[in-house]
Image (tube, rainbow, N blue to C red):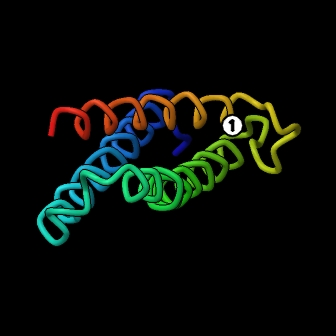
Amino acid sequence: MTPGLVEIILIDLVTLFLMVATVLILWYGVKKIFPGQTRDLQFFLTFIVVVVPFVMLIYFGLAVINYDAMTRSSGWEPVLPLKSPLSLPIIGLIVFYIGLTVWLWSSWRRE
């Protein structure tokens, strides 16, 4: 059975949802564990620079590996290895990172 476009889109959407949910759960967990420190700019920047990219790397890496396996089994052109540092998956990851950062910043600023 060859994967269709619908399955690939569903897997990508689930990956994005899990990525946002994990970052949200971690952020609210950190706010409960360290209630006074989350208002500190250095603490927030550390979360944005260390935790968010780590979570995104895990989910994004699993999604790209899964997508590559699906495309290879269907006879499409494989995704891995990425051809250039500015390939479409990397640009998508950067755009999504900026979106998550802005979303967390607006949540942090409202505190």
* Number of marks present in the image shown: 1
Q: Which sits in the foreground, 39 or 28?
A: 39
Tell me: residue 10, above or below residue 60.
above
Tell me: residue 8, above or below residue 51.
above
Quick one: label 1, few (<14), some, or many (20+) residues within 10 Å?
some
Tell me: residue 37, above or below residue 66.
below
Q: Residue at x 32, y 54 (%)?
A: 40
On the image, numbered disc 1 is attached to which residue? 90
Q: Residue at x 77, y 49 (%)?
A: 80
| Local SS, label 1 | helix
Q: Which sits in the foreground, 5 or 57?
A: 57
Q: Which sits in the foreground, 88 or 39?
A: 39
Spot occupied by residue 21 in the image (x, y as percentages of width and height): 25, 49
Query: Is residue 13 shown left or right of residue 32?
Result: right
Query: Is residue 36 shown left or right of residue 12?
Result: left
Spot occupied by residue 86 in the image (x, y as percentages of width and height): 80, 31
Spot occupied by residue 55 in the image (x, y as percentages of width and height): 45, 58
Q: Amino acid at mark 1?
A: Ile
Query: Is residue 84 shown left or right of residue 14?
Result: right
Q: Residue at x 67, y 48 (%)?
A: 68
